[in-house]
């Protein structure tokens, strides 16, 4: 069975964006970007909420991203090749290939996807991830902690969710970014 991982780049105080909605501080430098690319190669399907999808769609709709560097081109190719499922009640249509729109996250449908998938799934965006955590769908957390305190904003991890975790891996990068990977325990 495929695994569903929650992937996020967060400040050390636990935010994916600051109070102004900015996340430019989270842009990975080359060593981290290469590591992220390697971690994402096993993902066959991305699950997104509307806002995260609109941010990530740039990897297909904005050609300048892929031409900025070989690492960015590599990520664009990984992302474009994967299936995407967008969960939104307000989005009218999707603008990228290999993408379908769903109105609600149905836990049983995700369980069927995991059972039949030949490659892993990843959920991104804290709102959708909260639903996935509460439904018991998340198998792993894949977190990149950036050495910055932003003091507030959008939290990376759900509140009011009690979940025991087992540390599987940790990597420290020269930039001070730390990658931690946890398994969700039953």
Image (cartoon, grey):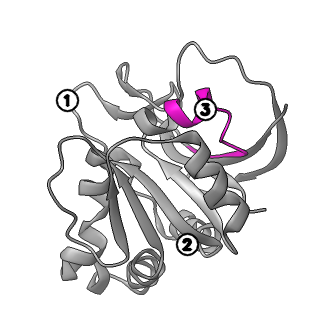
Relative depth, front residue between 1 and 44: 1
The spot of residue 134 in percent (x, y) is: 60, 26
The spot of residue 147 in percent (x, y) is: 52, 38
Quarter of the view holding residue 128: top left
Mark 1 or mark 3: which comes first in sequence? 1
Quadrant the N terminus occupies: bottom right
The spot of residue 168 in percent (x, y) is: 84, 48
The spot of residue 69 in percent (x, y) is: 36, 83
The answer to whether residue 176 of the structure is visible from this angle is no
Q: Secondary structure at mark 3?
A: helix
Q: Secondary structure at mark 1?
A: loop
Q: Which residues are magenta?
A: 130-144
101 is higher (above) or lower (below) than 139: below
Mark 2 or mark 3: which comes first in sequence? 2
- Label 1 belongs to which residue? 20
Residue at image x 40%, y 51%? Answer: 48
- Label 2 belongs to which residue? 37
- 123 in the magenta segment: no
Relative depth, front residue between 65 and 138: 138
The answer to whether residue 65 of the structure is visible from this angle is yes
User: Callout 3: few (<14), some (14-19), or many (20+) C-alpha neighbours within 10 Å?
Assistant: some
Say whether residue 96 is left or right of residue 159: left
Mark 1 or mark 2: which comes first in sequence? 1
What whole-number distance in Å separates the C-alpha atoms at marks 2 and 3?
A: 24 Å
* Name of the residue lying farthest toward the left: 92
Q: Secondary structure at mark 2?
A: helix
- Label 3 belongs to which residue? 133
């Amino acid at each position: 069975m495929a695994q569903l991982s929650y992937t996020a780049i967060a400040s050390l105080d636990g935010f994916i964006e600051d109070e102004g909605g900015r996340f430019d501080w989270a842009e990975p430098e080359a060593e981290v970007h290469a590591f992220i690319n390697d971690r994402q190669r096993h993902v066959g399907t991305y699950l997104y909420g509307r806002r995260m999808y609109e941010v990530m769609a740039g990897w297909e709709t904005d050609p300048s991203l892929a031409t900025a560097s070989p690492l960015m081109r590599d990520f664009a190719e990984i992302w474009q090749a994967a299936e995407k499922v967008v969960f939104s009640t307000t989005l009218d249509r999707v603008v990228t290939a290999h993408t379908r729109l769903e109105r609600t996250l149905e836990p049983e449908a995700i369980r069927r996807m995991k059972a039949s998938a030949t490659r892993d799934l990843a959920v991104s965006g804290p709102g959708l991830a909260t639903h996935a955590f509460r439904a018991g769908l998340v198998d792993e957390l894949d977190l990149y902690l950036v050495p910055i305190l932003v003091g507030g904003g959008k939290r990376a991890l759900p509140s009011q969710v009690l979940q025991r975790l087992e540390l599987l891996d940790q990597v420290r990068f020269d930039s001070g970014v730390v990658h931690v990977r946890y398994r969700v325990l039953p």
